[in-house]
């Protein structure tokens, strides 16, 4: 009797599952390249972005949602997929004092701000950007705040966020130079830290690390520098600048730069946001800073980046 009940139950289950819709196993065009600007002659902003894309190969956006697509899930259910630019460089990590940099908030810019932004990029940025440096896309925004890199430019996962575009027409020379330095830093940091420059970068890092034998120089509580730093000339106070850092970490002013990535980024922005004379005027008496400055200039020159 139990066997008959089992057989009936199995038969009913088999009939029910045979009526289920087969799972979708093909996903046509789901690997679409979204980072392409399509022209729209009827929209002046899109048309201008398209012309910039055709000239430079860099897609420009004013919205982080850059497209949508009708899709089916594995059970055949329809849904709308939205492709969104990722503004976080790291896909993980806790948001603590040593967390990877990330964008905290942003506001969209107006279409009216785009012409000035494109003109600035063409005049100030593209001549300094080597043709073989890949820029996946640029997102123009009105304002943004980031954990680690201020409010001018931020290197995200598949885009570089550029803020303050509404302020471009009224920027004074000093602000404009700092703005340029921040944007170039976001565009170039990965290229500067390419493996082919490993030997130069090791010298750059070791220029600061040599002052600490029992602890890494990166991510040190500044009030402990006097305890760990050795080898400074007599009478020189153990400060971040004395061991070759331009300043403390932007994420926490009580620590030296928490990563080599941040250290390099700070140098790139300072170098490309000013001139050789300005840098030497500010840091010329700091021997180790000038040594590290020379290493980054060497890499930038090799990349073909013009340094004033």
Image: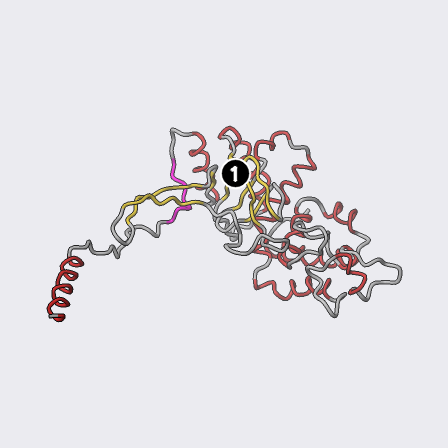
Region in magenta: 33-39
- Look at the image and tell me whether residue 290 can be seen: no
Residue at (66, 40) in percent of width and height: 177
Quick one: 270 or 148, which is closer to the camera? 148
Furthest residue to the right?
235
Residue 255 in the image: above or below residue 68: below
Quick one: 255 or 284, which is closer to the camera? 255
Secondary structure character of the magenta stretch overall? loop
Name the residue that disc number 1 marks: 140
Q: Please state the horizontal and vertical placement of residue 113, each as a whole percent of the image.
A: 53, 31
Q: Is residue 35 magenta?
A: yes
Dot 1, crowdedness within 10 Å: few (<14), some or many (≥20)? many
Q: Is residue 203 magenta?
A: no
Residue at (68, 49) in percent of width and height: 271
Q: Please state the horizontal and vertical placement of residue 184, each as a whole percent of the image.
A: 60, 46
Q: Please state the horizontal and vertical placement of residue 161, each as a whole percent of the image.
A: 54, 43
Left/right placement of residue 124 relative to residue 28 reads: right
Left/right placement of residue 154 relative to residue 281 reads: left
Residue at (39, 46) in percent of width and height: 34
Picture quadrant of residue 275: top right
Task: Please state, as top left, top right, bottom left or bottom right, where the N terminus lies in the image.
Answer: bottom left
Residue at (61, 49) in percent of width and height: 185
- The image shows a total of numbered marks equal to 1
């Amino acid at each position: 009797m139990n066997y008959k009940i089992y057989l009936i139950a199995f038969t009913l289950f088999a009939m029910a599952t045979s009526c289920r819709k087969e799972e979708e196993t093909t996903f046509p065009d789901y690997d679409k390249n979204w980072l392409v600007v399509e022209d729209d002659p009827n929209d002046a902003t899109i048309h201008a972005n398209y012309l910039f894309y055709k000239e430079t190969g860099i897609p420009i956006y004013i919205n982080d949602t850059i497209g949508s697509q009708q899709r089916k899930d594995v059970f055949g259910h329809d849904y709308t997929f939205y492709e969104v630019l990722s503004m976080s460089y790291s896909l993980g990590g806790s948001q603590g004092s040593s967390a990877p940099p990330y964008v905290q908030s942003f506001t969209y810019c107006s279409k009216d701000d785009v012409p000035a932004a494109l003109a600035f990029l063409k005049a100030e940025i593209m001549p300094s950007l080597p043709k073989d440096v890949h820029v996946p896309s640029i997102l123009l925004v009105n304002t943004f705040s980031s954990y680690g890199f201020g409010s001018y430019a931020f290197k995200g996962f598949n885009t570089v966020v550029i803020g303050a575009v509404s302020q471009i027409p009224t920027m004074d020379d000093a602000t404009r130079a700092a703005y340029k330095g921040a944007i170039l830093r976001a565009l170039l940091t990965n290229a500067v830290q390419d493996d082919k420059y490993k030997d130069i970068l090791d010298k750059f890092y070791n220029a600061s690390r040599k002052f600490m034998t029992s602890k890494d120089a990166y991510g040190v509580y500044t009030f402990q520098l006097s305890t760990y730093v050795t080898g400074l000339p007599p009478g020189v106070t153990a400060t971040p600048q004395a061991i070759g850092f331009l300043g403390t970490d932007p994420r926490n002013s009580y620590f030296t730069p928490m990563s080599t990535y941040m250290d390099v980024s700070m140098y790139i922005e300072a170098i490309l946001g000013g001139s050789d004379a300005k840098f030497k005027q500010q840091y010329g008496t700091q021997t180790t800073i000038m040594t590290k400055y020379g290493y980054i200039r060497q890499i930038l020159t090799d990349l073909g980046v013009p340094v004033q």
